[in-house]
Image (spheres, rainbow, N blue to C red):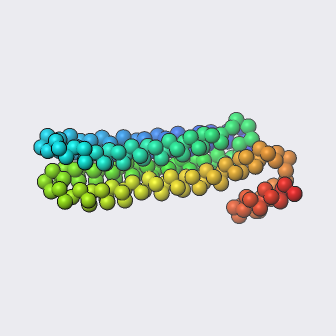
Amino acid sequence: MSVCPPYAPFFGFAGVASAMILSTVGAAFGTSKAGIGIAGLGAFKPELIMKSLIPVVMSGIIAVYGLVVSVLIAGSLRPNDYSLFAGFVHLGAGLACGSTGLAAGYAIGFVGDACVRAYVQETKVFVAMVLILIFAEVLGLYGLIVALIMNTAATGLVYAHRSKKSARWDWNAMKAGDAQRTLSRNRE
């Protein structure tokens, strides 16, 4: 079996799509759910609308996380010399970012809606709302961090494979995750 089969980029593109689609769905859900609460608040206290836009802004950031991961993965995709391992790592990175973005958008939407409606009655809820939203947002940030780490590992292997097509690979070291030692040994 080839290390770089012709269908390997499919998995990388699936990672790009899952990061972008799932995180955008999460952001859209969070924006719409929180926006419904803001519309209800605006009917009673229009002066509080600007402070209540925080959940909508935080939902939009979730989509940016997916965009960043999608662009990074897409930047390392090539029709040739793209390993199956890199494709699977990129798929995992896209799913990690996209699914955490979906979960974070869901949490931000429900918390934003409930807290904005409570903010009409009691202004002391604002600080608690911001703290809860931060903890909901950090779920998406965790997925972004994991996806960046995974992409870095896969990108190093993609570029090393391109520069050393005829090099002999030490697969035991690769399995152990020690790509740097393997690459330096091949350069000597």
* Left or right of residue 60: residue 184: right
Question: Which residue reaches farthest top?
Answer: 79
The reply to whether residue 101 is visible in this rendering is yes
Residue 78 screen position, x and y as percent: 69, 37
Residue 182 location in percent, x, y?
A: 78, 59
Compared across the picture, whether 175 is left or right of 45 comes to right
| Residue 2 visible in the shown view | no
Tell me: residue 38, above or below residue 121: above
Q: Position of residue 32 (x, y in %)?
A: 30, 41
Q: Quadrant of residue 73?
A: top right
Residue drawn at the location 16% of the way across and 41% of the way down? 46
Residue at left offset 59%, top offset 55%: 149
Q: Position of residue 123 (x, y in %)?
A: 17, 56
Residue drawn at (41%, 46%) of the image: 61
User: For this rendering, which residue is in front, 5 or 58?
Assistant: 58
Q: Residue at 72% x, 62% y: name it.
A: 178
- Location of the C terminus (image quadrant): bottom right
* Residue extending furthest toward the right: 188
The quadrant holding residue 82 is top right
Give the number of callouts.
0
